[in-house]
Amino acid sequence: MHDNVRHASGFTVIGNHLAQHRGLSLVALGLAVHIQSLPAGAKVGIKVLAGRFPESETRIAAALRELEATGYLHRSRVRLPDGRVVTRTVSYNRPGAEAPAPTIPRQRAGRAAAPAAPAAPAAPASPVPPRAPAPATERPPPTSVPLPAPVHGPAPTARTAPPPPLPQPREAVPELHRAAAAILADLRRHAPQLVLSERDVLALTPGVATWLERDAHPDTVRQALVTDLPFPLKHPAKLLRHRVTTLLPPPLPGTQELAPVRSGVLVIPLQNCDTCDRAFRSRHPGHCRGCRPDLPTAA
């Protein structure tokens, strides 16, 4: 039974093809109804929707993909006049149906037809020409919102030069390669979109092995690869190759590089002279100033 009251304002018309869709989840149905009830120009990004509803960003992203697959949403990348590239979302209340041609509103049609109603007799010629009627002011439809032009050509971040080579370890250690392959294969447990093929794992293993060779902890490597992933992620192997190459940490410094600094000046260590056993300051062992064979005082 339904106890319905007719809405006079503040309502959205939803077709049964959406409300009773058998291929969409409840989250996707709810998002479709919510998006169709918003005015044109409203923000419907994943983070905005996650802040509005209790569902997580992962569930909302999956629901948006469902709506895209069934034709209720279309997302495209567009460039704004200030140069920024954003995502434009178009919501369809009836996928596959063409929008009707724009018609003249009734109010304007009535005003235009009003002067032609009375049949006036033909007036004699007058020396003063009749005044032309003022053109009607065209008002844009209430739902028309200027949309930015679609992006043509490569995005501002598109790569024009060949990518840098993948890092290679100095020594081929089987243990490092096995650990690197395990880290790559295990990434899909932490980020489901990072599903790699065996070929991709074999190709990226030397780069991750270089991280491990430089004493990077496996958790550090995993955090650098799965943090802040873009959406949608179309090429996970290319993204991981880029991060493995560009985020590679430098080798750990040695004891000489980590010498203590006092008052902002590097403290040079003490050495014992190989000839007289006298202490002198130098970064390398050898002879003191008085015992150097290349000085004239030692001759």
Image: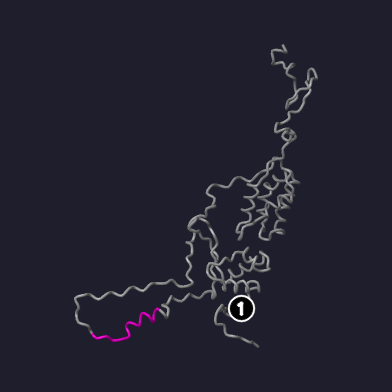
Q: Is residue 279 left or right of residue 41?
A: right
Vertical arrangement, residue 138 with respect to residue 120, above or below:
above
- The image shows a total of numbered marks equal to 1
How many other residues sit within 10 Å of disc 1, few (<14), some (14-19) or many (≥20)?
Answer: some
The spot of residue 18 in percent (x, y) is 59, 77
Q: Residue at x 63, y 69 (%)?
A: 63
Q: Residue at x 33, y 85 (%)?
A: 117
Magenta segment: does it hold 114?
yes
Magenta segment: does it hold 85?
no
Residue type of the residue flagged with mark 1 = Ala
Vertical arrangement, residue 2 with respect to residue 105, above or below:
below
The spot of residue 153 in percent (x, y) is 48, 56
Q: Nearer the viewer, residue 139 or 280?
A: 139
Q: Residue furthest bottom?
A: 1
Q: Quadrant of the image for the N terminus?
A: bottom right
Vertical arrangement, residue 211 with respect to residue 13, above or below:
above
Q: Is residue 122 left or right of residue 27?
A: left
Q: Nearer the viewer, residue 190 or 132?
A: 132
Q: Residue at x 67, y 58 (%)?
A: 194
- What is the span of residues highlighted in magenta in the rendered image? 108-121
Q: Which element carries disc 1, helix, strand or loop?
A: helix
The spot of residue 22 in percent (x, y) is 63, 77
Q: Quadrant of residue 53?
A: bottom right
The spot of residue 103 in percent (x, y) is 42, 77
Q: Quadrant of residue 260?
A: top right
The residue identified by callout 1 is: 19
Q: Quadrant of the image for the C terminus?
A: top right
